[in-house]
Image (cartoon, rainbow, N blue to C red):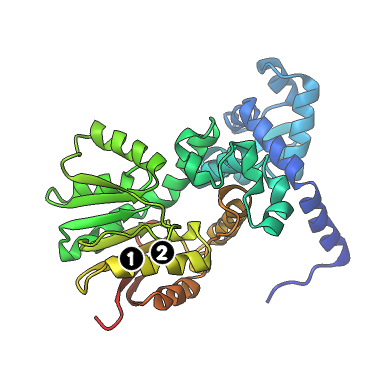
Amino acid sequence: MKKELSAIEAKYEAQKIAFGPMYFQAVIALRDLGILQFISSHRQGVSIDTIVEKLDVSEYGITLLIEAAEIIGVVEIENSLVKISKVGFFLLKDEMTKVNVNFMNDVCYLGAKAMTKSIVNGKPEGLKVLGDWPTIYEGLSILPEPAKTSWFEFDHYYSDNAFPEALKIVFRKKPKMIFDVGGNTGKWSFACCDYDPEVKIKILDLPVQLNVAKANATERGLLERIGFHKIDLLDVEQKIPQGADVIWMSQFLDCFSKEQIVQILQNAWQAASEDTTLYILEPFFDNQNYPAAHYSLVATSLYFTIMANGNSKMYRVEVMKDLVRQAGFEVVETYPLIGDSYHTILECRKNGQ
């Protein structure tokens, strides 16, 4: 049972929200100025005087940031010595935390002020700080740095860990042709080619993404096995072609609203034969082992609102299953939290098959 907060505790929690952006940027400064790493390298603790002496930062700046870090539990101060805490250790060393911090700071932070406007207008009003596109997807390959690097590191972190187990599942039936829908830079397609030397792939995506995927495939000498199909899946006139043994959608459908997801899945339905398997890989926020993952995925929904397209989100697993059914598919198998990842795979077939 959840402990009820006292009025004093609740007021303190409210102040954490009020001043959260300031403390977040204090952590960024501690990291970028090398202060957090310096403290971490002194396991027994280090004095503020020593930090001032060794780093090219004023005593004022170091004191200010360490006082902020102590408040939020990033460092601990004992007998005038500053030590990194477990929280600080995760900020420095944990891959998930580093990826999330960079994504928030480089991609989302400046646009977050447009949250209310984005929700009212149903558009990613915060995206204007990065570029002039209707959604972030048209600009992915030309995002300014460091936003571009941080976006792709975030995206790949939350998909790559799922690939080893996902490949075993998808290749159980030895597919000869896989359609990688929303294939982005081509990482899944390349993993498939490595896994099975016979398989052929077709990447379906917007032209700007296909340019990147094609360049990457050229570099790997895979143009004989990977084809490219330009498609805007929000345009109902543009159809997914037929001929796939597997239609693969990895972290793709969360980029769309519920109505758009049904439309895209209906497009897949018309392309699928009775022998085609549709696989949907998603990190469903209500199907996670740890509160940190649940917390991060719900926050990612807010990114979709302000920066991506203004109308998509991370979904609950049963919501996605319902959308699959609405489009004429049935979920024949659910693979929850595959491998060392945050992802579930839904294996789907055309209804009645």
Q: Is residue 251 above or below residue 185?
A: below
Quarter of the figure with residue 272: bottom left
Disc 2 to disc 1: CB gap under 8 Å: yes
| Disc 2 element | helix
- Crowdedness of circle 2 by 10 Å Cα count: few (<14), some, many (20+)? many
Query: Residue 134 or 188: which is nearer the viewer?
Result: 134
In the rendered view, does 58 fall on the left or right side of 131?
right
Q: Quadrant of the C terminus?
A: bottom left
Q: Is residue 199 above or below residue 269?
A: above
Query: Residue 353 or 163: which is nearer the viewer?
Result: 353
Rendered image: mark on residue 244: none
- Amino acid bearing label 1: Ala
Quarter of the figure with residue 346: bottom left
In the rendered view, does 45 fall on the left or right side of 236?
right
Residue 267 percent location from the top left of the image: 36, 65
| Residue 236 in sight from this viewpoint | yes
* Residue at the disc numbered 2: 264
Check the image and name the residue furthest to the bottom.
Answer: 352
- Amino acid bearing label 2: Ile
* Residue at the disc numbered 1: 268
The residue drawn where x is 74% and y is 43% is 21
Residue 93 percent location from the top left of the image: 52, 39
- Crowdedness of circle 1 by 10 Å Cα count: few (<14), some, many (20+)? many
The residue drawn where x is 52% and y is 42% is 99
Check the image and name the residue furthest to the front.
Answer: 237
Q: Disc 2 versus disc 1: distance between alpha carbons?
A: 6 Å
